[in-house]
Each structure stands twice: as structure tokens, then as C-alpha cells.
Amino acid sequence: MTTRFAVRLTPRGGRDAIDGVGDDGALRVRVAAPPVEGAANEALCRLLARALGVSTGAIRIVGGASGRRKVVEADADPSVVAAAWPGLGAAAPRGGPS
């Protein structure tokens, strides 16, 4: 099974860490690696793989590889991903009634 979710990546973030799910439903992640020659993307994949208990090859960036907002696909059970990061993919409502 595969699961897709949004990630907001901060390269050169001081350390590799998953900071939780933001108000927009995207997973907030920081890595120490710079955004040079794919180093930050590789660090992101390693960190997510470790957190989900899957191989690094089971994590792929399928959208936004050169930006801070990315779409990641993981070969992991959706229930495992949902348990790891509650609220992932659930964006907070914006604004009030029109």
C-alpha cells in the first residue's frame, strides 16, 4: 500500500526533526542538510523512512522536489502513517462564512 501526504521542508534547520502537522495539514520537517544537489531531499527521505520503520527506498518525493512544499509517497500502511502523525492531510478551515 502507498500513502501520499504533503510535507513542508526546512533545509538547514539545524537538526533533522519532524515537528508535527501544521494547520495546513502538511507534515513540518526540518533537516540539517542544505538544499544543494538533492541533499535536503535525501535527508528528508531517510528521516521519514526511519520514523515509519521502512526502507529509504520506500519513500519517494513525487511532487515539489525543488521547493519547500513537497508531496511524498510512502510504501507504508495508511493506518501506520495516520497513527504516527494525527491530523496529517486535514487542513484547518480558512476564514469565516461568506
Image (cartoon, rainbow, N blue to C red):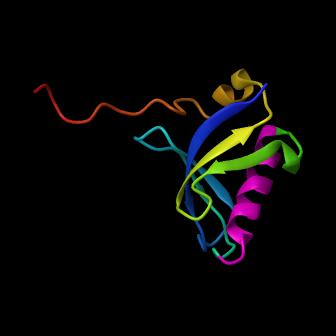
Q: Is residue 91 above or below residue 33?
A: above
75 or 66: nearer the viewer: 66
Residue 65 figure quarter: bottom right
Residue 77 rendering spot, x and y as whole percentages:
77, 25
State the residue lying farthest toward the top. 79
Of the 4 image quadrants, the one containing the N terminus is top right
Give the residue at x 72% y 70%: 38
Q: Is residue 85 left or right of residue 58?
A: left
**Is residue 25 one of those drawn in magenta?**
no
Q: Is residue 53 above or below residue 12?
A: above
Q: Is residue 48 left or right of residue 56?
A: left
Specify start and end residues of the magenta stretch as a single range. Answer: 36-52
State the residue lying farthest toward the left. 98
Give the residue at x 53% y 63%: 67
**Is residue 48 one of those drawn in magenta?**
yes
Give the residue at x 57% y 29%: 86
Of the 4 image quadrants, the one containing the C terminus is top left
Residue 36 figure quarter: bottom right
